[in-house]
Image (cartoon, grey):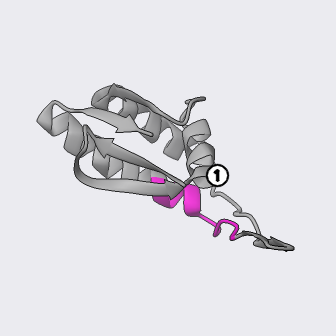
């Protein structure tokens, strides 16, 4: 399963696996895995997160029986925040809301 963040379902979405999306959304202060926000406010959260959060150390991959967690590369959160910054700027310029879910 995954979570897609879009500019009201237009443009290129930012897709993330559920656990990675939960980490990024938590960094932005959102508790729910779905929602929408004014693009200007969303952009403000992204810029604040980029300014205040040190580089994500990542998480190692784990294999336990038939379950595999692929982990998260170092710097993943900052990379995704930069993609979300671009998406929020796109949405703001067009008067669109940012949606995720």
73 part of magenta stretch: yes
Front residue (pair 9, 31): 9
Residue 6 colored in magenta in the image? no
Left or right of 19? Residue 82 is left
Instruction: Tell me the residue at 60%/29% (across/down).
Output: 31
Pick whichever, 63 or 44, lies toward us. 63
- Give the residue drawn at x 38%, y 54%: 14
Instruction: From this view, report whether residue 93 is shown above or below residue 72.
Output: above
| Residue 35 sits in quarter | top left
Residue found farthest to the front: 66
Task: Identify which residue, 52 or 92, lies in the foreground.
Answer: 92
Query: Disc 1 marks which residue?
Result: 19
Give the side of residue 90 with respect to residue 33, left or right.
left
Q: Quadrant of residue 25?
A: top right
**Residue that appears at 75% across and 72% down:** 61
The reply, left or right, for residue 78 in relation to residue 98 is: right
Residue shown at 53% from the left, 40% from the top: 49
What element does badge 1 sit on? helix
Q: Position of residue 83 (x, y in %)?
A: 38, 55
Q: Which residues are magenta?
A: 70-80
- In the rendered view, does 88 fall on the left or right side of 96? right
Residue 78: x %, y % from top left: 53, 56
Residue 62, compared with residue 38, is above or below; it is below
Quadrant in the picture for the N terminus? bottom right
Q: Position of residue 54 (x, y in %)?
A: 64, 51
Q: Is residue 80 above or below residue 27?
A: below
Above or below 89: residue 12? below
Residue 50 image position (x, y, % from top left): 50, 46
Mark 1 closeness class: few <14, some 14–19, many ≥20 residues within 10 Å: some
Quarter of the picture containing the C terminus is top left
């Amino acid at each position: 399963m995954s979570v897609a963040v879009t500019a009201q379902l237009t443009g290129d979405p930012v897709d993330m696996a559920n656990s990675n999306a939960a980490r990024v959304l938590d960094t932005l202060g959102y508790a729910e895995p779905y929602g929408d926000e004014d693009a200007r406010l969303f952009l403000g959260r992204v810029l604040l997160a980029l300014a205040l959060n040190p580089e994500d150390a990542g998480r190692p991959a784990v294999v336990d029986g038939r379950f595999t967690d692929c982990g998260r590369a170092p710097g993943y959160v900052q990379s995704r925040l930069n993609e979300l910054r671009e998406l929020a700027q796109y949405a703001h310029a067009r008067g669109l809301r940012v949606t995720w879910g």
